[in-house]
Amino acid sequence: MSAVADTHAQDHHHGPAKGISRWLLTTNHKDIGSMYLIFSFTMFLLGGAMAMVIRAELFQPGLQIVQPEFFNQMTTMHGLIMVFGAVMPAFVGLANWMLPLMIGAPDMALPRMNNWSFWLLPCAFLILVSTLFMEGGAPNFGWTFYAPLSTTYGPPSTTFFIFAVHIMGVSSIMGAINVIATILNMRAPGMTLMKMPLFVWTWLITAFLLIAVMPVLAGVVTMMLMDINFGTSFFDASGGGDPVLFQHVFWFFGHPEVYIMILPAFGAVSHIIPAFSRKPLFGYASMVYAVGAIALLSFVVWAHHMFTVGIPIVGQLFFMYATMLIAVPTGVKVFNWVATMFRGSLTFEAPMLFSVAFVILFTIGGFSGLMLAIAPADFQYHDTYFVVAHFHYVLVPGAIFGIFASAYFWLPKWTGHMYDETLAKTHFWLSFVGMNLAFFPMHFLGLAGMPRRIPDYALQFADFNMVSSVGAFMFGATQLLFLFIVVKCIRGGKEAPAKPWDGAEGLEWTVPSPAPYHTFATPPVVK
Amino acid sequence: MAEQQANSAGAPKGNARVVGWCMVSVVGMFAFGFAMVPLYDVFCEITGINGKTGGRYESTEVAEADVTRTVKVQFLASNGPGMTWKFRPVVRSVDVHPGEPTTVNFYAENPTSEPMVGQAVPSLAPSEGTLYFHKTECFCFNQQPLEAGESTEMPLIFIVDKDLPAHITKLTLSYTLYDQGKQVSAAQNSRKETTTNDNG
């Protein structure tokens, strides 16, 4: 059995092809993972630049830099690019790199589809970003593209936006199928489901979520397309449709989507915290069940985004309590991370710093989520900066810090070099301070009544907005340091041993650093 | 738990099965997205939660008004985007007894120099009362054509159900009148006029 695999490995592919065709035609999970990560970081900088435009305009009250029309395009594109271009591809990149290494597989199960699902993404975002240069401008109706704002009143480029969403949806679905097939079929002998590393578990569940909701997103944009171009009235009241229906269908996708963006981070942090606490993860099984519970609950809470559109009292109560129920499995996870650290031999290298900040700040974001879940209180918070503060607290120190933690944790494995620890810690502290400075005042602004998605605001909001903008500039500029650290680490640095973190566990640390182009041609045996 | 013995030799067949199931789920969920449209309509019709009043009400039982109870019914009329008609209720509100058929009129006038067609879309608040508000005759059941400069009074005959929950003492019926273009089949013309990219 193993002999067959060995000869196969020696017959073909000794290393990567040369030139551009290596990247265009590659079916190697490590190459594709790297491309996903590079693409994601490019989109992160692009979406971040748009956030800088937003914060520059909001630095002072009044209109200084951009016109309201362009401001609306910036908020919309920032949201779309960060969600679909930065966070989701980053996790797919991590999955591509790490899943085969973690389960002892030679590659992803469907390598050609893997190549295709990556290369669809640049096409989708080329279309999306090109709308900025079209007549009438880019989509300007917010990343949630509520009808009829996006159908009846949307710019002509909306059709391109819809097409881009279709393509990125196809890409995500193919990526998810690949992940499921890899995890179910390619595990090393002896690796039962309950022996799988948590990153593998969280990605398996994330992939199921993707398969369940990305088609619904495709459906809702298809309905928009037909309303705009083919005279149907799905969301048009004058033709017998209902705009509220849009919100139901959208959020049926949208709520599981937010867990798609956080569950893989849960998984990664569940590797990093035990590694730097030099203790096994506390409560492995409960972690798995908690992720499963969160994923299931995410399908029955969507209307908490819509309390103010007019939901009967019974519906409000149901969605309020169902939403609060999610705090229970999330609480289990936070408890387990803290319990893992409790009485551990902690050291605070950059991955650990990002992970500890993840636990603390994500919990803050979770608490503001609980506040928003209270239906009667939500009428006050709805569409204010409090909501903006909430979802940035779960996405920036949640998803993005999770990605940074993962990047630093596995960079030695990817590049064969240790990154510059001093610079990485600087990156962490500047990000941490900048991020809190940017987003914490938004809580106060929202509670004081500042609406979201406005280019100008009343005078009493001026000071907090200025603080927030300063924090945002700081956070934004700091990410260039991250780029520098990664480039420096790729080009050289201290040689990384196969297992650079003494507390780390898992099959990925049994292969040399940098991980050879082909790994686990012979499956390892997991006891 | 056949997957537990997964190995590279058994993978291709297993992959086909996994991909097959995933594709079935993807197609199923795409269809589910569209199925939400009729499901939503049926759900709202049964529960009345979106305030859309039902079609023509026909009852075989001879209604006897409940004179011990009075419900105030208010009327609102507004125009959809781009609609130029004058549109208002003749009376702003009436007090009715549950079970008693009541007739009210809405005034509509086409001030333009073109014949036009309008369609009124009703909505009732609170939505809890929707199931207890019956219309036996309503101009909203049909499109309303008006010649240039023509005006009309459009009738609405309704009955408030005797089973209306006791805590509801007031119902507000609002109509939004939409421009349906020059003829019945010209619904797309109105779309073209109302679709703008002007957000300023």
Image: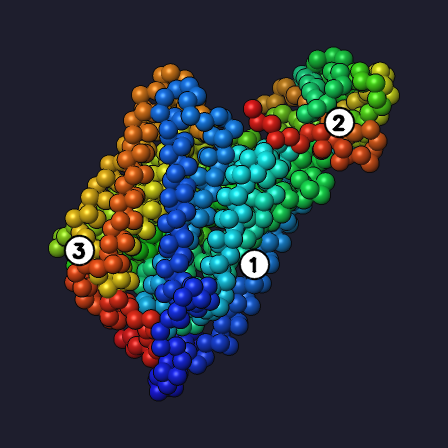
Q: Is there any visible trace of residue A336 in the rendered image?
A: no
| Rendered-image quadrant of the N terminus of chain A | bottom left
Q: Secondary structure at mark 2?
A: strand
Q: Is the residue A75 above or below the residue A343 in the image?
A: above
Give A72 or A330, whichever is nearer the viewer.
Answer: A72
Instruction: Say which residue appears at 41% left-offset and 53% top-offset.
Output: A39
Pointers 1 and 2 in contact (C-beta within 8 Å): no
Image coords of residue B84 (percent x, y): 74, 19
Image coords of residue A458 (percent x, y): 41, 17
What residue would you read off at disc 1? B26
Instruction: Say which residue appears at 35% left-offset and 87% top-offset.
Output: A3
Q: Is the residue B107 above or below the residue B128 in the image?
A: above
Count of residue discs = 3
- Residue A418 is labelled as none
What residue would you read off at disc 3? A277
Quarter occupied by residue A66: top left
Mark 1 on the same chain as mark 3: no
Q: Chain of mark 2?
A: B
- Which tag is nearer the camera, tag 1 or tag 2? 2
Q: Earlier in the sequence, mark 1 or mark 2?
A: 1
Q: Chain of mark 3?
A: A
What residue would you read off at disc 2? B179
- The kind of residue on which mark 3 rests is Ser
- Which tag is nearer the camera, tag 2 or tag 3? 2
Judge the density around disc 2: few (<14), some (14-19), many (≥20) Cα neighbours within 10 Å: many
Quarter occupied by residue A5: bottom left
Judge the density around disc 3: few (<14), some (14-19), many (≥20) Cα neighbours within 10 Å: many
- The kind of residue on which mark 1 rests is Val
Give B89 or A110, whichever is nearer the viewer.
Answer: A110
